Amino acid sequence: MLLITCPETGTDELVPDRRIRSVVNHPTHIALHVACPCGAVHVYRTGRRWEAARRAAATRPAPRLAPA
Ligand SMILES: [Zn+2]
């Protein structure tokens, strides 16, 4: 199970592992593509280096995926 915060509804959602559509391993972090109960697929990034980079770049907006 995975606890996510939906960026669309702002609610915490507990989603099963099978809802994870893909896991992409990056040098600085791991990107999880999760099919949210709201119907959208959200990307969540995990990893200590990602968290550190995000803190260092706190003044910059987080990267967003452009709609297809
Ligand atoms: Zn959602």
Image (spheres, rainbow, N blue to C red):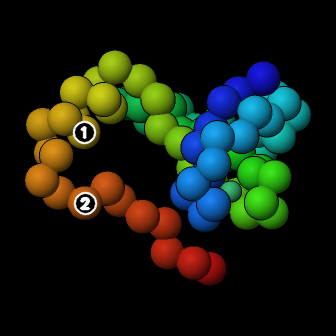
Q: Are marks 2 and 1 in contact (CB under 8 Å)?
A: no
Q: Position of residue 39 (x, y in %)?
A: 80, 63
Question: In what quadrant does ligand 1 lie?
Answer: bottom right
- The Cα–Cα distance between marks 2 and 1, rounded to whole angstroms, is 9 Å
Residue topped by disc 2? 61
Q: How many labels were placed on the picture?
A: 2
The front one of 19 and 4 is: 4
Q: Amino acid at mark 2?
A: Pro
Q: Residue at x 31, y 56 (%)?
A: 62
Give how far across and how far down residue 21 sits, in percent. Answer: 77, 44
Q: Quadrant of the N terminus?
A: top right
Question: Looking at the picture, does residue 10 appear above or below residue 48?
Answer: below
Quick check: 52 left or right of 62?
left
Q: Quadrant of residue 28?
A: top left
Estimate the x, y position of residue 14 in percent, counting from the top left.
75, 33
Query: Which image quarter holds the C terminus?
Result: bottom right
- Going from N to C along the chain, the mark reached first, 2 or 1, is 1
Residue drawn at (12%, 53%) of the image? 59
Q: Is residue 21 above or below residue 66?
A: above
The verdict on label 1 being within 8 Å of ligand 1 is no
Which SS class for mark 2? loop
Q: Residue drawn 41% across and 24% down?
A: 47
Where residue 41 appears, x then y in whole percent?
A: 70, 57
Report whether residue 22 is seen. no
Label 1: which secondary element: helix
In the image, taking residue 30 as reference, residue 64 lies left or right, namely: left
Residue count near mark 2 (Cα–Cα under 10 Å), binned few <14, some 14–19, many ≥20: few
Name the residue that disc number 1 marks: 54
